[in-house]
Image (cartoon, rainbow, N blue to C red):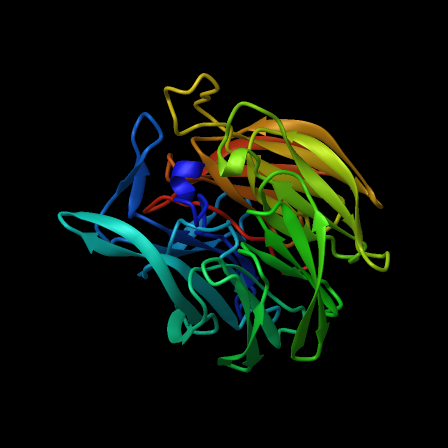
Amino acid sequence: MQQRHLGIAALVSTAFIALSTPAGTQVIVSGNDEKILWNDAGQPVFLPPGNDTISFIDIADRENPKILTSIALENSIFGPPTNLAITPNAELALVANSMTQSKDGEKWKPVPDNKVYIFDLKANPPKQIGTVEVGKQPSGLDISKKGDLALVTNRADNSISVLSISGKDVKVIDTVAMGDSVAHVAISPDGTKALAIKPVVNKVAFLRIDGGKVIYEKYDMPTGIFPYNVDIVPSGQIALVANNGGGGNPDGNVDTVSVIDLAQNPPRVIDHVVVGDAPEGFAISPRGDLALAILLAGTSDKKAWFFRKAGSAAVLKIDGKQVTKVGEIELGGLPEGVAFSPDGAYAYVGNFLDSDISILKVSGTQVSDTGKKIKLPGHPASLRGVPK
């Protein structure tokens, strides 16, 4: 929503990531931001810092997950629901903190941060082992499937930080100027290309990757209004871009998901699929046949004519390069991110206002609500899927 973006940031940046621990336990990681709520008119209320947490949740029992531990760590709700990621070998997690709280007289206000935290996932329990400084307001990020490269979008700096990963050593090796504010980036499965989202100018930028060198040739593709999230199918043939619409605000009007053909040279937008009002959380199943677009649907502004108490998930069927909406599932208050289980049989959606996670069952392209929830120690804003 625009009041949540504050001109430079969007609603979410806490996230969930699926991974496997050394013992084979499957876990999702939730960042819980306790520094912001909204009044009945949808206006932000900023709270003192110090209560944020990162929760590690065991999903080995798909329908009955349990919280393993929660660690005190500042993380920000501003930015897309992709501000953390894990290495494919599940050894490290990177967590970007987009915004931090600054004292403003007797009140608090968010200001851009520049930190990416490094977690050792082999430790029992996982622990923070380092911090790297990137550009201003680090937001969406992604890690290559080889696990040796990470890209971090810096919204307030109009740039992308390039990070090298070698074992547990993570360092910044380059910065790529993007010309416009960038909110999220996705790296192709073969590691040769990436897409970076430009929400303010309604475009997605194409990047080439050659080893540790990331090259922006200033080729952008038009999307829908306010693109804010992107994911690539496991085959690498297409990418899907969730267009938040209305400058980031739910507004009662339908919004779209853009389909990008990555097999063409240059890649291009080949379709726009209507999904509903304000998709923000977005993820493609590890199976590659289904995606979920999480619709905010105006759930924080109780005075708006389009107010709805609960948001929903639009179900998209993926058949080659054809994408169609095949269903919609009601969720909780202000739903944000979504993560699939490693086998794609379940999906988990964070309900920010309810401080819990909805558990959905996936059978082919049929998605149903199990009715079960994971109660969290704070407000989740988004989730992340397993590396594909």
At horizontal 37% and vertical 45% (from top left) the residue drawn is 376
Q: Position of residue 83 (x, y in %)?
A: 49, 57
At horizontal 30% and vertical 47% (from top left) the residue drawn is 34
Give 273 or 198, whichever is nearer the viewer: 198
Q: Is residue 87 above or below residue 1?
A: below
Q: Does residue 221 appear left or right of residue 116 in this picture?
A: right
Give 302 or 375, whichever is nearer the viewer: 302
- Indicate the quadrant where residue 134 lies: bottom left
Q: Is residue 19 above or below residue 352?
A: below
Q: Position of residue 327 (x, y in %)?
A: 68, 27
Give 239 or 29, whichever is nearer the viewer: 239
Q: Position of residue 313 (x, y in %)?
A: 59, 33
Q: Quadrant of the N terminus?
A: top left
Q: Quadrant of the C terminus?
A: bottom right
Question: Residue most toward the left?
Answer: 106
Q: Is residue 199 visible?
A: yes
Report the number of numbered marks.
Answer: 0
Q: Is residue 69 visible?
A: no
